[in-house]
Amino acid sequence: TRKSRPQRLLKAVEGKATLGDPQSVITAIDHFCRHKEWAMNVGDEKGSILDSLVIELSPVNVLELGTYCGYSTVRIARLLPPGARFITLEFNPDYAAVARQVIGWAGLEDKVQLVEGASGDWIPRLREHFGVQMFDLVFLDHWKDQYLPDTKQLEECGLIQKGTVLLADNVICPGTPDYLKYVRNSPHYDSRYYRSHLEYTKVEDGLEKSVFLGF
Ligand SMILES: O=C(NCCCOCn1ccc2cnccc21)c1cc(-c2ccc(F)cc2)cc(O)c1O
Ligand SMILES: [Mg+2]
Protein backbone atom coordinates (compact mmCIF):
# COMPACT_ATOMS: atom_id res chain seq x y z
CA THR A 1 0.00 0.00 0.00
CA ARG A 2 1.06 3.60 -0.64
CA LYS A 3 3.25 5.14 2.07
CA SER A 4 1.54 7.49 4.51
CA ARG A 5 2.31 11.22 4.55
CA PRO A 6 4.43 10.89 7.70
CA GLN A 7 6.39 8.08 6.02
CA ARG A 8 6.93 10.26 2.94
CA LEU A 9 8.06 13.09 5.25
CA LEU A 10 10.52 10.69 6.93
CA LYS A 11 11.91 9.69 3.51
CA ALA A 12 12.54 13.37 2.81
CA VAL A 13 14.44 13.68 6.10
CA GLU A 14 16.51 10.54 5.36
CA GLY A 15 17.28 11.84 1.88
CA LYS A 16 18.24 15.39 2.84
CA ALA A 17 19.22 15.67 6.50
CA THR A 18 22.60 14.99 8.13
CA LEU A 19 22.49 12.34 10.86
CA GLY A 20 22.88 13.97 14.28
CA ASP A 21 22.19 17.49 13.00
CA PRO A 22 18.83 18.77 14.34
CA GLN A 23 18.84 21.93 12.18
CA SER A 24 19.20 19.86 8.99
CA VAL A 25 16.20 17.74 10.07
CA ILE A 26 14.12 20.89 10.67
CA THR A 27 15.21 22.36 7.30
CA ALA A 28 14.44 19.10 5.44
CA ILE A 29 10.93 18.88 6.91
CA ASP A 30 10.16 22.55 6.21
CA HIS A 31 11.37 22.18 2.60
CA PHE A 32 9.28 19.04 2.10
CA CYS A 33 6.14 20.64 3.58
CA ARG A 34 6.54 23.91 1.70
CA HIS A 35 7.45 22.51 -1.71
CA LYS A 36 6.19 18.92 -1.84
CA GLU A 37 3.38 18.13 0.60
CA TRP A 38 1.79 20.19 3.40
CA ALA A 39 1.84 18.55 6.84
CA MET A 40 0.63 19.76 10.23
CA ASN A 41 4.03 20.52 11.82
CA VAL A 42 4.17 23.77 13.78
CA GLY A 43 6.38 25.00 10.91
CA ASP A 44 9.22 27.51 10.57
CA GLU A 45 7.35 30.76 11.34
CA LYS A 46 5.59 29.62 14.53
CA GLY A 47 8.66 27.42 15.18
CA SER A 48 10.86 30.50 15.50
CA ILE A 49 8.47 31.93 18.11
CA LEU A 50 8.58 28.56 19.91
CA ASP A 51 12.40 28.62 19.80
CA SER A 52 12.63 32.09 21.35
CA LEU A 53 10.24 31.14 24.15
CA VAL A 54 12.18 27.92 24.93
CA ILE A 55 15.49 29.84 24.95
CA GLU A 56 14.02 32.53 27.24
CA LEU A 57 12.43 30.00 29.60
CA SER A 58 15.28 27.42 29.59
CA PRO A 59 12.80 24.87 30.99
CA VAL A 60 13.92 21.80 32.95
CA ASN A 61 10.67 19.81 32.70
CA VAL A 62 8.78 19.94 29.40
CA LEU A 63 5.58 18.19 28.30
CA GLU A 64 4.44 18.15 24.66
CA LEU A 65 0.94 16.95 23.82
CA GLY A 66 0.95 15.97 20.14
CA THR A 67 4.26 14.70 18.75
CA TYR A 68 3.05 13.97 15.20
CA CYS A 69 6.30 13.49 13.19
CA GLY A 70 8.53 14.97 15.89
CA TYR A 71 9.22 18.33 14.21
CA SER A 72 8.40 20.50 17.25
CA THR A 73 9.94 17.81 19.46
CA VAL A 74 13.27 18.32 17.65
CA ARG A 75 12.87 22.12 17.74
CA ILE A 76 12.36 22.06 21.51
CA ALA A 77 14.82 19.27 22.44
CA ARG A 78 17.73 20.84 20.54
CA LEU A 79 17.44 23.95 22.79
CA LEU A 80 17.05 22.27 26.20
CA PRO A 81 19.78 22.55 28.85
CA PRO A 82 21.63 19.33 29.82
CA GLY A 83 19.69 17.34 32.39
CA ALA A 84 16.32 18.68 31.23
CA ARG A 85 13.48 16.18 31.00
CA PHE A 86 11.18 16.19 27.95
CA ILE A 87 8.10 13.97 27.68
CA THR A 88 6.13 13.99 24.43
CA LEU A 89 2.80 12.21 24.06
CA GLU A 90 1.41 10.83 20.79
CA PHE A 91 -1.92 9.04 20.37
CA ASN A 92 -1.34 7.59 16.87
CA PRO A 93 1.17 4.70 16.83
CA ASP A 94 2.06 5.26 13.16
CA TYR A 95 2.89 8.92 13.86
CA ALA A 96 4.87 7.84 16.95
CA ALA A 97 6.89 5.34 14.89
CA VAL A 98 7.87 8.05 12.39
CA ALA A 99 8.59 10.54 15.19
CA ARG A 100 11.01 8.11 16.88
CA GLN A 101 12.98 7.92 13.63
CA VAL A 102 12.93 11.69 13.04
CA ILE A 103 14.09 12.31 16.63
CA GLY A 104 16.78 9.64 16.09
CA TRP A 105 17.98 11.33 12.89
CA ALA A 106 18.39 14.54 14.88
CA GLY A 107 20.45 12.61 17.46
CA LEU A 108 18.12 13.72 20.26
CA GLU A 109 16.72 10.33 21.37
CA ASP A 110 18.48 10.63 24.76
CA LYS A 111 16.71 13.94 25.52
CA VAL A 112 13.18 12.84 24.72
CA GLN A 113 10.77 10.29 26.19
CA LEU A 114 8.07 9.56 23.62
CA VAL A 115 4.96 8.03 25.18
CA GLU A 116 2.12 6.51 23.15
CA GLY A 117 -1.42 6.96 24.36
CA ALA A 118 -4.21 9.41 25.18
CA SER A 119 -3.60 12.53 27.29
CA GLY A 120 -6.64 11.81 29.45
CA ASP A 121 -5.19 8.44 30.40
CA TRP A 122 -1.57 9.56 30.82
CA ILE A 123 -1.79 12.92 32.62
CA PRO A 124 -2.87 11.38 35.96
CA ARG A 125 0.01 8.89 35.74
CA LEU A 126 2.91 11.17 34.72
CA ARG A 127 4.05 11.94 38.25
CA GLU A 128 4.30 8.37 39.58
CA HIS A 129 5.40 6.88 36.22
CA PHE A 130 8.12 9.44 35.36
CA GLY A 131 8.82 10.92 38.78
CA VAL A 132 8.13 14.43 37.48
CA GLN A 133 6.71 16.90 40.06
CA MET A 134 5.65 19.75 37.78
CA PHE A 135 6.23 21.09 34.26
CA ASP A 136 7.94 24.39 33.44
CA LEU A 137 6.60 24.30 29.87
CA VAL A 138 3.62 22.51 28.30
CA PHE A 139 3.31 22.69 24.49
CA LEU A 140 -0.28 21.90 23.44
CA ASP A 141 -0.57 20.70 19.85
CA HIS A 142 -2.97 17.76 19.93
CA TRP A 143 -6.77 17.50 19.44
CA LYS A 144 -7.95 21.10 19.71
CA ASP A 145 -10.99 20.20 21.83
CA GLN A 146 -8.66 18.48 24.30
CA TYR A 147 -6.60 21.59 25.20
CA LEU A 148 -9.07 22.80 27.85
CA PRO A 149 -9.96 19.50 29.60
CA ASP A 150 -6.27 18.52 29.65
CA THR A 151 -5.22 21.89 31.09
CA LYS A 152 -7.78 21.48 33.87
CA GLN A 153 -6.57 17.94 34.53
CA LEU A 154 -2.93 19.14 34.66
CA GLU A 155 -3.99 21.80 37.20
CA GLU A 156 -5.86 19.23 39.32
CA CYS A 157 -2.87 16.86 39.27
CA GLY A 158 -0.58 19.69 40.43
CA LEU A 159 1.58 19.36 37.30
CA ILE A 160 0.97 23.04 36.53
CA GLN A 161 2.35 25.31 39.27
CA LYS A 162 3.14 29.04 39.70
CA GLY A 163 5.33 30.04 36.75
CA THR A 164 4.42 27.13 34.46
CA VAL A 165 4.10 28.31 30.86
CA LEU A 166 1.44 26.83 28.59
CA LEU A 167 2.13 27.34 24.88
CA ALA A 168 -0.78 26.43 22.61
CA ASP A 169 -0.56 25.96 18.84
CA ASN A 170 -3.49 26.59 16.44
CA VAL A 171 -5.51 28.88 18.67
CA ILE A 172 -6.96 30.50 15.51
CA CYS A 173 -6.72 27.71 12.89
CA PRO A 174 -8.19 25.13 13.43
CA GLY A 175 -8.98 27.12 16.61
CA THR A 176 -9.42 26.36 20.29
CA PRO A 177 -12.18 28.80 21.33
CA ASP A 178 -13.09 27.31 24.71
CA TYR A 179 -9.39 27.06 25.73
CA LEU A 180 -8.70 30.66 24.65
CA LYS A 181 -11.68 31.98 26.58
CA TYR A 182 -10.53 30.09 29.69
CA VAL A 183 -6.89 31.22 29.77
CA ARG A 184 -7.71 34.81 28.72
CA ASN A 185 -10.48 35.29 31.30
CA SER A 186 -8.96 33.35 34.20
CA PRO A 187 -7.34 35.45 36.97
CA HIS A 188 -4.89 32.57 37.38
CA TYR A 189 -3.26 33.03 33.96
CA ASP A 190 -1.39 35.86 32.27
CA SER A 191 -2.06 35.17 28.59
CA ARG A 192 -0.54 36.61 25.41
CA TYR A 193 -1.21 35.94 21.70
CA TYR A 194 1.70 35.65 19.25
CA ARG A 195 0.19 36.35 15.83
CA SER A 196 1.58 34.22 13.01
CA HIS A 197 0.31 31.98 10.19
CA LEU A 198 -0.85 28.42 9.77
CA GLU A 199 2.29 26.43 8.94
CA TYR A 200 3.46 26.87 5.32
CA THR A 201 0.42 29.04 4.41
CA LYS A 202 -0.80 32.66 4.48
CA VAL A 203 -3.78 31.77 6.65
CA GLU A 204 -3.77 33.49 10.06
CA ASP A 205 -2.92 31.36 13.07
CA GLY A 206 -0.89 31.93 16.20
CA LEU A 207 0.43 30.69 19.51
CA GLU A 208 -1.07 31.60 22.87
CA LYS A 209 1.40 31.79 25.77
CA SER A 210 -0.24 31.56 29.19
CA VAL A 211 1.75 31.84 32.42
CA PHE A 212 0.12 30.24 35.47
CA LEU A 213 0.11 32.73 38.37
CA GLY A 214 -0.76 30.18 41.05
CA PHE A 215 -4.11 29.64 42.77
O1 LIG B 1 -5.14 18.44 14.36
C1 LIG B 1 -4.03 18.95 14.55
N1 LIG B 1 -3.19 18.46 15.44
C2 LIG B 1 -3.58 17.30 16.28
C3 LIG B 1 -3.30 15.97 15.60
C4 LIG B 1 -3.93 14.82 16.37
O2 LIG B 1 -3.48 14.79 17.72
C5 LIG B 1 -3.99 13.69 18.46
N2 LIG B 1 -3.20 13.53 19.66
C6 LIG B 1 -1.85 13.67 19.74
C7 LIG B 1 -1.49 13.40 21.03
C8 LIG B 1 -2.63 13.11 21.77
C9 LIG B 1 -2.86 12.74 23.11
N3 LIG B 1 -4.11 12.48 23.52
C10 LIG B 1 -5.16 12.57 22.67
C11 LIG B 1 -4.99 12.94 21.33
C12 LIG B 1 -3.71 13.20 20.90
C13 LIG B 1 -3.60 20.10 13.70
C14 LIG B 1 -4.35 20.40 12.55
C15 LIG B 1 -3.97 21.45 11.72
C16 LIG B 1 -4.77 21.78 10.50
C17 LIG B 1 -4.97 23.11 10.13
C18 LIG B 1 -5.71 23.42 8.99
C19 LIG B 1 -6.25 22.39 8.23
F1 LIG B 1 -6.94 22.68 7.12
C20 LIG B 1 -6.06 21.06 8.59
C21 LIG B 1 -5.32 20.75 9.73
C22 LIG B 1 -2.82 22.22 12.00
C23 LIG B 1 -2.10 21.92 13.14
O3 LIG B 1 -0.97 22.64 13.45
C24 LIG B 1 -2.47 20.88 14.00
O4 LIG B 1 -1.71 20.66 15.13
MG1 LIG C 1 -0.40 22.32 15.45
Image (cartoon, helix red, strand yellow):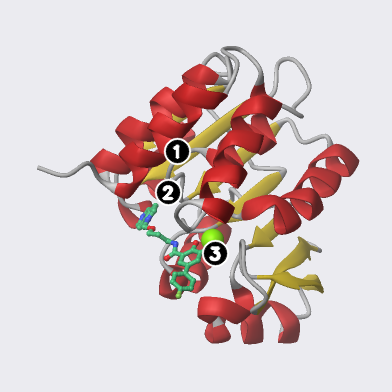
Instruction: Locate the N terminus by quadrant.
Output: top left
Q: Amino acid at mark 3?
A: Thr
Front in this rendered view, residue 58 or 173? 173
Query: Is 14 on the left-hand or right-hand side of 4?
Result: right
Q: Is residue 150 above or below residue 97?
A: below
Tell me what residue is drawn at x 65 percent, y 42 percent: 135
Query: Is 134 on the left-hand or right-hand side of 130?
Result: right
| Circle 3 residue | 151
Return the x and y of residue 200 as percentages of the image width and height.
62, 62
Instruction: Locate the C terminus by quadrant.
Output: bottom right
Query: Is 177 on the left-hand or right-hand side of 128?
Result: right
Q: Find residue 114 and report its image quarter.
A: top left
| Circle 1 residue | 126
User: Where's ligand 2: which quadrant?
Assistant: bottom right
Front in this rendered view, residue 164 or 105? 105
Q: Is residue 120 above or below residue 122?
A: below
Q: Amino acid at mark 1?
A: Leu
- Mark 1: few/some/many CA within 10 Å (<14, 14-19, 20+): some
